[in-house]
């Protein structure tokens, strides 16, 4: 009788182990599905769906390890904000689909002509952002290369859109205590200043200060004689 109960007990334990194994298998599968859904949700939150570039949040997240590495190596970190000019007119007269074609061409141009160590992303509807190690190059040189490349392979006839870009920049030196948000904010302010004042870059490097005129004001014109 005792052996009989022992056999029953062993059978119950064995069945319980089998059930636990099935439940564990289902849980692992469900965990993988949940992880995939979370990853897709995170991607939606960090990647621009149209251009497949990091969005504003994605840029800030990807720039964080770049800043840590730059400070660890005693290097600077630079940021560019590139504004696409004339896009509002393209959207108005040709439609947003055509405007999206212009944005896609600018995004591809940035991917091609920026360094492999640079992170290229979409900053806003009409702006892109580039973050990378070092002090960066001449703004005039960057603008000339990008506009030249777009002119060679224009997304639209120049009668519809002539390649025009405004480029702003900022830099965090190794001894500064600023954050990624500090860097991004400075570069965006510089781009806004260039757009508002129409100040040519004149070979200014990322290490230079922002334009001397405040945003929203233009330099006084000389009186006509």
Image: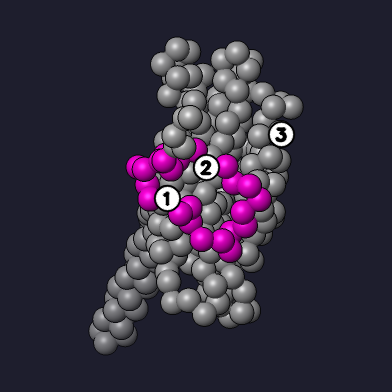
Which comes before the other along the chain, label 1 or label 2? 2
- The residue singled out by tag 1 in the image is 213
- On the image, which quarter does residue 143 sit in? top right
Instruction: Tell which of 9 and 177 is nearer to you.
Output: 177
How dense is the environment of label 3, judged by Cα within 10 Å: few (below 14), some, or many (20 and up)?
A: some
Q: How many marks?
A: 3
Q: Residue at x 38, y 50 (%)?
A: 214
Asked if the residues shown at circle 1 and circle 2 are in contact, with their CB atoms under 8 angstroms apart, the answer is yes
Residue 212 included in the magenta stretch of the image: yes
Element at badge 1? loop
Q: Is residue 73 above or below residue 44?
A: below
Q: Residue at x 43, y 71 (%)?
A: 178
Is 21 or 8 nearer to us in this picture?
A: 21
- Marks 1 and 3: in contact by CB < 8 Å? no
Q: Earlier along the polypeptide chain: callout 3 or callout 1?
A: 3
Could you tell whether 109 is left or right of 77 in the image?
A: right
Residue 22 visible (yes or no): no
Per the rendering, the mark at residue 202 is: none
Q: CA distance from mark 3 to mark 1?
A: 30 Å
Q: CA distance from mark 2 to mark 3?
A: 22 Å
Q: Nearer the viewer, mark 2 or mark 3?
A: 2
What is the CA distance from the residue labelled 1 to the residue labelled 2?
A: 9 Å
Give how far across and how far down residue 61 sits, in percent: 45, 60
* Residue position for label 3: 149
> Could you tell me residue 46's position as x and y percent?
43, 50
> Residue placed at 46% from the left, 54% from the top?
212
Residue that appears at 55% across and 77% down: 174
Quadrant where the image shows the N terminus: bottom left
Which stretch appears magenta?
Answer: 196-220
Which residue lies under the disc numbered 2? 199
């Amino acid at each position: 009788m005792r052996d009989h109960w022992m056999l029953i007990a062993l059978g119950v334990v064995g069945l319980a182990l089998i059930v636990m194994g099935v439940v564990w298998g289902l849980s692992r599968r469900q965990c993988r599905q949940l992880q995939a859904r979370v990853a897709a949700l995170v991607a939606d939150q960090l990647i621009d769906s149209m251009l497949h570039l990091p969005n504003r949040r994605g840029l800030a997240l990807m720039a964080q390890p770049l800043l840590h590495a730059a400070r660890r190596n005693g290097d600077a970190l630079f940021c560019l904000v590139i504004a696409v000019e004339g896009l509002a007119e393209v959207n108005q007269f040709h439609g947003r689909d055509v405007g999206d074609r212009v944005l896609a061409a600018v995004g591809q141009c940035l991917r091609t002509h920026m360094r492999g160590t640079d992170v290229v992303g979409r900053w806003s509807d009409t702006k892109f952002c580039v973050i990378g190690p070092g002090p960066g190059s001449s703004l005039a040189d960057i603008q000339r290369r990008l506009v030249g490349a777009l002119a060679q392979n224009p997304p639209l006839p120049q009668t519809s859109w002539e390649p025009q870009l405004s480029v702003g920049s900022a830099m965090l030196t190794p001894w500064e205590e600023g954050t990624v948000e500090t860097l991004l904010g400075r570069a965006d302010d510089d781009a806004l200043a260039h757009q508002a004042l129409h100040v040519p870059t004149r070979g200014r490097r990322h290490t230079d200060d922002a334009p001397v005129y405040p945003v929203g004001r233009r330099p006084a014109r000389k009186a006509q004689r």
